[in-house]
Amino acid sequence: MTEEEFLIEMKNFFENIDKLKIDLEKQIKETELVRDDLLHELELANLDAIDMSKLAKTLKKVLKERRKYKDELAKVMTLKGFTDKYNNKLIVGDIINVLKNLKTLKSNNSTRTYRARRITNLKCTEIKELEEV
């Protein structure tokens, strides 16, 4: 991974952590609604043993999915504590400036030339002289 790729990933991390938190909270809420539906089915419906077994398997699957989202949210909240410690707008702005500076350096390095001061037949100046003609 290059420095630029790393900085882009870092910028994305700081910019997207809040969105990730909101998305996980929505997923948790959605699975809780499904869970509540299943619990009401268990409470209110007259189910035989086969239907209760199917319901229990479905409920177990929904609860595992909810746990997965909650565990992921716990990780995100830990990371968010880190990102909230710094002003996201400031650090993202700094990262953008560093990326611009790296791009400028790369451009300058690729077009670097030298003008000889005393010696006239240097190979490094011949390329420039040929381009000027």
Image (cartoon, rainbow, N blue to C red):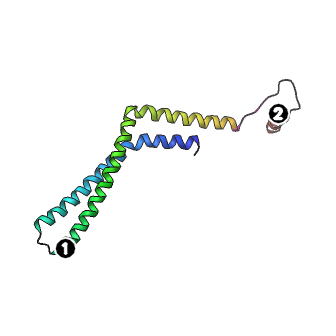
Q: Main secondary structure of the magenta part?
A: loop
Left or right of 116, for residue 43: left
The dot on residue 62 is none
The dot on residue 125 is 2
Along the line of sight, which residue is nearer the eye, 98 or 112? 98
Q: Position of residue 42 (x, y in %)?
A: 15, 66
- Picture residue at 18% right of the left edge, 59% below the top: 36
- Picture residue at 54% right of the left edge, 34% below the top: 98
Q: Quadrant of residue 106?
A: top right
Q: Position of residue 68 (x, y in %)?
A: 33, 55
Local packing at callout 1 (Cα closer than 10 Å; few below 14, some 14-19, many 20+) is few
Quadrant containing the C terminus in the rendered view: top right
Secondary structure found at label 1? helix
Residue denoted by label 1: 51
- Picture residue at 40% right of the left edge, 44% below the top: 16
Say whether residue 43 is magenta.
no
Which region shows up in magenta?
110-124
- Picture residue at 49% right of the left edge, 32% below the top: 94
Q: Amino acid at mark 1?
A: Asp
Q: Amino acid at mark 2?
A: Thr
Secondary structure found at label 2? helix
